[in-house]
């Protein structure tokens, strides 16, 4: 988590962690199930993240942390929040519970606007700890944590903490701003939610739009029937060759029944790979997220 001076920006952009982000979304569906994901259908309210001008810092921090605990469905987890000088934005001590200790960087004493974002990341660590859901590598586990926070309704705060101007370059979390936007857009496509009006940072809104554009393109990738003409031509050429071009999300493989060829491709909602016979128009239902997809294989 970073903050720097005015001359150079440490903020990484684009989609460098996209494979891990997609794997994280799939892991959430597998661990929580479709029904479990649907219980997180309401994003964390901006009102619950806000501090009143005269609110006591420690009481307010505990109020916000408790609200995030409730939003992430952790009813018996108690957060103890304290402030100290440190390099990171915040850390959490993971143990058996029910009490968890969060240490927050002293700079949030003055920058209370972003305190909820830092707490959202740390409370999500607690949720994943309780779920026994983790990736082997530490860096990937941090990507999983940010992805889970965004996909389950609290991580929009982390994107909204992103700001770049002449005086400040700030980003919280380990995803790029565009990757946060991508995850939030995938959540929005699943739940019919629009967070556009919630962003107070213009740069965060722009990153959300860029991430949403990628998520919407994934709904139009071959062999989905909504693919555009160029995509369908490319798919047809690869199908005749029996091999996908480099960079394609689909793969061709022999059908185990011995009756022909099938194509595998990721579900655009949960990321689980689907396998369909190559035989033209077909309707498929993802067994993990229950999405019904119109395909032309």
Image (cartoon, rainbow, N blue to C red):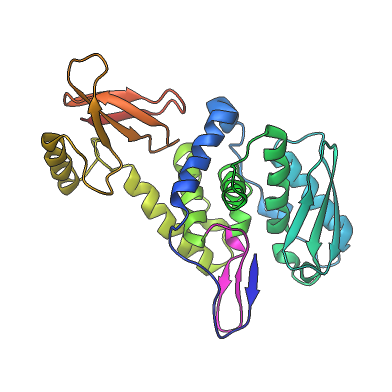
Residue name at image x 58 percent, y 71 percent: 163
Q: Is residue 171 magenta?
A: yes
Left or right of 55, for residue 173: left
**The residue positioned farthest toward the front in the image shown:** 136
Q: Which residues are magenta?
A: 159-175
Left or right of 239, for residue 60: right
Image quadrant in which you'd find residue 28 = top right
Q: Is residue 49 magenta?
A: no
Residue 122 in sight in this render: yes
Q: Quadrant of the C terminus?
A: top left
**Foreground pick, 16 / 55:** 16
Left or right of 274, for residue 209: right
Image location of residue 186, percent across then percent down: 46, 44
Residue name at image x 23 percent, y 35 percent: 225
Image quadrant in which you'd find residue 233 = top left
In the image, residue 265 sits, relative to residue 58, either above or below, namely above
Residue 55 in sight in this render: no
Left or right of 294, for residue 103: right
In the image, residue 287 sits, relative to residue 201, either above or below, namely above
Image location of residue 41, percent across then percent down: 58, 37
In the image, residue 7 sits, relative to residue 190, either above or below, namely below
Residue name at image x 53 percent, y 42 percent: 24
Q: Quadrant of the N terminus?
A: bottom right
Q: How many marks?
A: 0
Image quadrant in which you'd find residue 283 = top left
Image location of residue 116, percent across then percent down: 72, 57
In the image, residue 259 sits, relative to residue 63, either above or below, namely above
Image location of residue 274, percent across then percent down: 35, 28
Residue name at image x 58 percent, y 58 percent: 174
């Amino acid at each position: 988590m970073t903050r720097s001076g005015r001359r150079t920006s440490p903020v990484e952009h684009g989609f460098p962690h996209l494979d891990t982000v997609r794997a994280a979304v799939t892991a959430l569906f597998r661990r929580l199930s479709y029904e479990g994901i649907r219980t997180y259908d309401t994003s964390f309210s901006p009102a619950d993240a806000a501090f009143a001008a005269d609110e006591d810092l420690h009481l307010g921090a505990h109020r916000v942390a408790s609200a995030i605990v409730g939003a992430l469905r952790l009813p018996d987890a108690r957060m103890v929040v304290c402030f100290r000088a440190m390099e990171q934005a915040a850390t959490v001590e993971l143990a058996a519970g029910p009490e968890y200790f969060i240490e927050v960087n002293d700079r949030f004493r003055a920058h209370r606007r972003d305190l909820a974002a830092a707490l959202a990341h740390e409370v999500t660590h607690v949720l994943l700890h309780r779920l026994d859901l983790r990736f082997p590598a530490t860096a990937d586990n941090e990507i999983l944590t940010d992805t889970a926070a965004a996909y389950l309704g609290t991580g929009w705060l982390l994107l909204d903490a992103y700001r770049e101007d002449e005086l400040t370059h700030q980003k919280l979390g380990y995803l790029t701003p565009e990757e946060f936007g991508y995850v939030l857009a995938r959540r929005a496509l699943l739940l019919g939610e629009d967070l556009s009006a919630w962003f107070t940072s213009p740069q965060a809104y722009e990153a959300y739009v860029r991430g949403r554009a990628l998520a919407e393109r994934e709904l139009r990738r071959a062999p989905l029937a909504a693919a555009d003409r160029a995509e369908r031509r490319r798919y047809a050429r690869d199908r005749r060759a029996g091999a996908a071009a480099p960079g394609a999300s689909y793969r061709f493989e022999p059908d185990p029944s011995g009756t022909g060829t099938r194509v595998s491709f990721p579900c655009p909602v949960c990321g689980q790979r689907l396998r369909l016979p190559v035989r033209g128009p077909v309707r498929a239902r993802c067994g993990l997220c229950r999405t019904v997809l119109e395909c032309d294989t």
